[in-house]
Structures are given as structure tokens and as C-alpha cells.
Image (cartoon, rainbow, N blue to C red):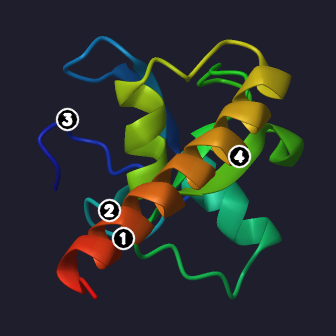
Amino acid sequence: MPRGGVKKPIGYETIWKDRNGRTRVKVKVEDGKRFVDKRIVVWMQHHPNDNLKGYCIIHLDNNPLNFDIDNLAKVKKEVFLLMLNNHMYFNDSELNKTSILTAEIMYEQKKQKRLAKANPK
């Protein structure tokens, strides 16, 4: 029996703040202690055969409580890191769509530059 005394059912949602103070919603998906971010659960319901390895699911409007599928985007982790490091993650979904495209171009440029350095002619 869990510490709280009551076992939570599958599908139970909990809202909490992570160590950086961001609000998160987790959903219980299996018996035991397995909880998963709700944005991932919603994404997988709409894209059941999608592989998320190397990717993250982000909220386009930066609202962690908006789980509309049109507000979620699958982004390479490297691209999202470029967005964060270059202050390109906003509270506006249209700006974020443009930021994703810009960061993807930046990522490809850096990758090409690295390849050119590794294989000089």
C-alpha cells in the first residue's frame, strides 16, 4: 500500500511544480508508481506509432495547462535547446512556430560546419 494509504487509479492526474517552479501535469499510466507528463500522453494518443527518442513535446503557447493537440509540437532536443539558449521560446504560439523553424536552420548550419571541420579538403 502506498505511503498516502490510497492507491491512485490509472488515469489519475496530478498537478505539481518542478524544481524550477514550472507547473507540470502528470498522469498515472500503469499500476505502481509510473506517472508520465500529460503532454506526452496526449501526443501519443494522437500519434500512437511515434518514436519520441531524441525529441521533446513542447507547448507552443508556453501554457503548461493547455493540452490541445494543436498547441503541442514535437521538436528535436537539440533544436529546443537552441531555442532556450537563444531566448527564442515565447508565450505566443505563432512566434514559437517560427522559432522552431529558425532553430532547425541554426542546428543544420552548426551540423554542416562541424562536418566541414571534421572533413577538410
Looking at the picture, tell me which residue is in the foreground, 74 or 15.
74
Residue 118: percent from left, percent from top: 19, 80
Instruction: Find out whether the residues at labels 4 and 2 contact each other: C-beta distance under 8 Å.
Output: no
Q: Position of residue 83 (x, y in %)?
A: 48, 33
Q: Position of residue 50 (x, y in %)?
A: 65, 81
Disc on res. 6: none
Gap between marks 4 and 3 measured at Cα: 45 Å
**Residue at 62 percent of width and 15 percent of height:** 90
Q: Any mark on residue 101, and which?
A: 4
Q: Is residue 53 above or below residue 6?
A: below
Q: Note whether 96 is above or below 43 in the view shown.
A: above
**Residue at mark 3:** 4
Where's the N terminus, which quadrant? bottom left
> Which quarter of the picture shows residue 3?
top left
Neighbour tally class for label 3: few under 14, some 14-19, many 20 plus, Cα within 10 Å: few
Tell me the SS state at disc 3: loop
Residue 34 is left or right of residue 12, and the answer is left
| For discs 2 and 1, the disc positioned in front in the rendered view | 2
Instruction: Look at the numbered discs 2 and 3 and tell me whether their residues touch, using CB distance below 8 Å.
Output: no
Q: Amino acid at mark 3?
A: Gly
Image spot of residue 64 (x, y percent): 59, 25
Inspect the image, locate mark 2, and give the three-letter code of the amino acid beneath it. Arg
Find disc 1 in the rendering and name its residue.
31
Q: Which residue is mark 2?
A: 34
**Considering depth in this image, is 70 or 1 the residue closer to the camera?**
70
Instruction: Give the distance between the C-alpha atoms of the residues marked 2 and 3, in whole angstroms.
Output: 16 Å
Q: Nearer the viewer, mark 2 or mark 3?
A: 2
Q: Label 2, label 1: how many angstroms apart (C-alpha)?
A: 7 Å
What amino acid does circle 4 point to?
A: Leu
